[in-house]
Image: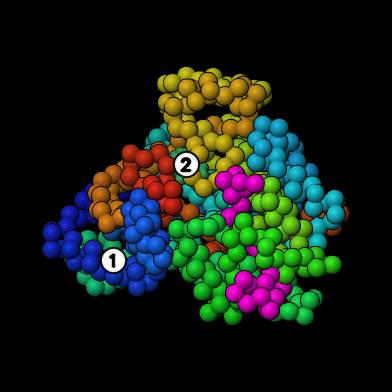
Amino acid sequence: MGSSPHNSYPPELSPEEQEYVLTNLKDWSIAHGLAVRPAPSFVPPDQDPTGVLAATAPVTLFPSLFPRKCFEDGLAIQTAYNELYSAIARDEGWLKDIVEELVDIDDFVGRLWQTHLAVKKEGYAQDLSLGLFRSDYMVHTDQSSPSSSLGLKQVEFNTIASSFGGLSSQVSRLHKYLLSIDAYPSSATSIINDEALRQSKSASSLARGLAAAHKAYGPSKSGRSLCVLFVVQNPERNVFDQRHLEYALFEENGVRAFRLPFEQTLLHTELDGERTLLYTPPNSPSTTYEVTTIYFRAGYSPDDYPAEKEWDARLHLEKSRAIKCPSVLTHLAGCKKVQQVLATPHSPHLKRFLPDDQVASRVLSTFAPIYPLDDSEAGQEAKKLAQNVDSASRYVLKPQREGGGNNVYRRAIPAFLETLPQTHWPAYILMEMIEPPPLTNAIFRNGELQRGGVIGELGVYGVCLWRKGADGKDAGQILENWEAGYLLRTKGDQSEEGGVAAGFGAVDSVCLV
Ligand code: ADP
Ligand code: MG
Ligand code: MG
């Protein structure tokens, strides 16, 4: 992206131009649900006792420049990633070897594994599984190649509660709208144009994934109306992101969905003799629905399990005959440890799950170096790197957690490791930092505009519905597999973390160059 017009992108705005962009951005955002519930630090709860307020979601003013080839590579590879993670989730024996290294040193992973074992003992009542996945990448400048070529490197693969599919569709529409009303100065429109702006179909496409599972479930066994259940956190600031999926599920697919706070699971659901999951909405106690598909937007973090009752709830849902998005095994397949094992150089693992060499090598090309912190040879090397402040400055240390805010970055790693007993180090992986090329943009968050250096993270959504094989007999079968749109999250380049909900980034869309 070295050529001149891109260097002055995005353009500076005059005060009048800025006023015009922001007025339109604010109104469009609220009018189209590109919104979040306000943070308590932004609007104190006593100023909104009835919970009626919404705020514009953090967004970039301009779509960020993104290398076309990288974008297209990311989309093209998604069905292979869906295939890979669905195969891992179906290979209990392989997953067991990995999880067993973690269960004694990571209670959360241990509890998830126990949940799986408890259901297995009774026998799984449903052999279909749904994944609404998101594979996250950054653009990496390969300094070792003579032309310092750009390539996509994977940050992580999400198998549970992959968020922002709803808002992402809206932000790409917002940027298109701003372009169409001439909110961007004419100096920028040689770069921002309809062709370069990619609309994200994620809301619709993910909803269609839920609808596919709902349909594959088959007819009601209890003679009741069928529904999808969104299992959610309470409160949830990112509720509109989820509502967009719910509304698309209803409006575009005719499927009814309900929101159930995770901690209320046992109050409002029950299993019948065939382990059919029945849901009775609290507002109409005389109507009970049969749940076809459980969509988890909660349950991915230990914070979601303050008491035993939440583990009972997860077990209860996992036991049921409803299709889980995701199943406990699929959730576990998303452990960072799995990503590290797959990335082991010359390992046979990728080939096991992706028999087509070409497909496997395309996936392999997106892996960044990741090391274990165990007693293996690679682990010993990694421990040395991680304990020295200078060498650690090229790495990020990650536990087996989701949702942002859990990693330890660069020079902070050695001191952090010192606080941990060595026996617990294998619960973490050490990953090389991906260093994207410098970019500039302006982020509008909580009513404030900040302009400066930014880092973008591309997420590509994937829908995959599969049937697991009869135990030990066959490998199962993929019924649906598609790429489901994209997300671009952009954060200030001074922040290591990128989570929008965690308070670091903004939703963005791509302007391909
Ligand atoms: P989580 O599951 O909590 O989202 P991630 O692996 O996505 O964990 O890490 C959180 C954030 O940390 C990412 O969104 C990204 O901004 C940053 N990050 C993680 N790994 C890397 C990496 N290898 N290089 C650069 N930044 C990274
Ligand atoms: Mg994650
Ligand atoms: Mg992440």
Q: Which residue is mark 2?
A: 405
Alpha carbon distance from label 2 to label 1:
28 Å
Classify 234 as above or below 423: below
> Which residue does the image show at 75% across and 41% down from the upper left?
96
Q: Which residues are magenta?
A: 279-307
Q: Which x, y percent locates residue 245?
A: 52, 68
* Label number found at residue 26: 1
Q: Give the label on residue 508, or none.
A: none
Q: Is mark 2 within 8 Å of ligand 1?
A: yes
How far across and down, in percent of the image, does residue 186 sit?
18, 65
**Vertical placement of 183 versus 157: above or below?**
below
Query: Residue 382's image quarter?
Result: top right
Residue at 36% x, 40% y: name it: 495
Q: Which callout, 2 or 1, points at the residue further toward the start of the chain? A: 1
**Depth order, front residue of 192/412:** 412
Residue 317: in sight, yes or no? yes
Amino acid, disc 1? Lys
Q: Residue 294 in magenta?
A: yes
Q: Nearer the viewer, residue 27 or 166?
A: 27
Q: Residue 33 colored magenta? A: no
Q: Residues within 10 Å of mark 1 (few under 14, many from 20)?
A: some
In this view, the residue in front, 484 or 298, is: 298
What amino acid does circle 2 point to? Gly
